[in-house]
Image (spheres, rainbow, N blue to C red):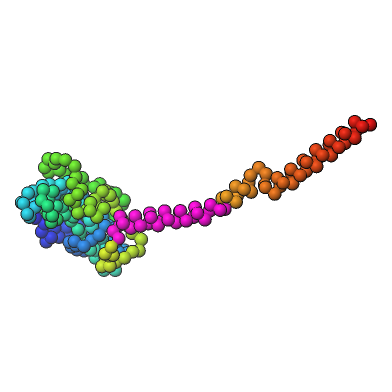
Amino acid sequence: MTLDIRTWEKTFQKLIQQEKPSAKWTLRLDGNLKPDYVSPGWRQYQQRAFGRFRCSSCQRSWASAQVQVLCHMCWDHWTSQGLVLMRLFAQRCQKCSWSPYQMPEFSTDSSTRILKNLVHRILEKYYGYGVKKYAEIPVVQELPLEGSHDIVNCEACALGFCAKGLQDYIPEPCQSLLSFPNTDSPSSLIGNVYVQNQENNQSAETERAPENQQNYEHNGSVPSHNREKLVICVCVFLFAYFVTKGFKLKW
């Protein structure tokens, strides 16, 4: 079934009002959502789904049980209204060169499962229904699938998002949804932090080297200046010993 946001919106409203009749929530698609870039006061929710794809170039079709669905959720306490922004991640045809990303299509059962999981998470996080009161409805494989997940042609994998698995993300205060950086993806930021930490560690080790060497010299068995005094004392003792012994032999 081709995605119809109006149908999804109606189903979403029906599901949430079955539990909270007074709840006012809006569902919108947003293709610009980025994983782990969440505005203050928002929450992130991720789930997988079973979907179908069709290549616009060669008309080849395929299915996947690894379609990533990303949601950013916010609830305004003063107006008692909530907003969900949803992004569905695309996949490319592995048979066509330079194939564009294709958006997924979902069956009625699959789309209902996605929305039920979303509603359950909203009830838990914003209406005090308890932590994990609702178990995640698992992905139902509607068709036999061959081979493993095609990470090369998965949009979510390209963003380093697909392999993270199901998770909630409650961020520290960060950038607005409208001010995402154009560069430095989460994976590259991790790389930059790693390189910077590595450089800092090397610098710290270099600074500690003279200190360690000095400590080694001071903690040795005999310091160099004391060693000279010891040698002189031994020589004087031996000289006095032999002189005294020779003097006694003469007598």
User: Would you place residue 51 above or below residue 244 in this image?
Assistant: below
Looking at this view, name the residue that lies furthest to the left. Answer: 59
Residue 56 is left or right of residue 190, and the answer is left
Looking at this view, name the residue that lies furthest to the front. Answer: 250
Picture residue at 20% right of the left edge, 59% below the top: 86
User: Would you place residue 235 above or below residue 32 in this image?
Assistant: above
Image coordinates for residue 17, horizontal then vertical, percent: 19, 58
Q: Main secondary structure of the magenta part?
A: helix
Residue 82 is left or right of residue 224, and the answer is left
Q: Quadrant of residue 237?
A: top right
Image coordinates for residue 35, horizontal then vertical, percent: 26, 57
Image coordinates for residue 70, horizontal then vertical, percent: 22, 56
Q: Does 199 appear in magenta?
A: yes
Work out whether residue 126 can be spotted: no
- Quadrant location, the C terminus: top right
User: Would you place residue 173 above or below residue 150 in this image?
Assistant: below
Residue 210 is left or right of residue 120, and the answer is right
Picture residue at 18% right of the left edge, 46% below the top: 150
Picture residue at 57% right of the left edge, 50% below the top: 213
Residue 6 is left or right of residue 207, and the answer is left
Residue in the foreground of this view, choosing between 43 and 220: 220
Work out whether residue 153 can be spotted: yes
Number of marks present in the image shown:
0
Picture residue at 86% right of the left edge, 37% below the top: 243
Q: Quadrant of residue 139?
A: top left
Residue in the foreground of this view, choosing between 65 and 55: 55
- From which residue to which does the magenta span run? 184-211
Q: Does 191 appear in magenta?
A: yes
Image coordinates for residue 184, horizontal then vertical, percent: 30, 60
User: Would you place residue 146 above or below residue 37 in this image?
Assistant: above
Residue in the foreground of this view, choosing between 129 and 37: 37
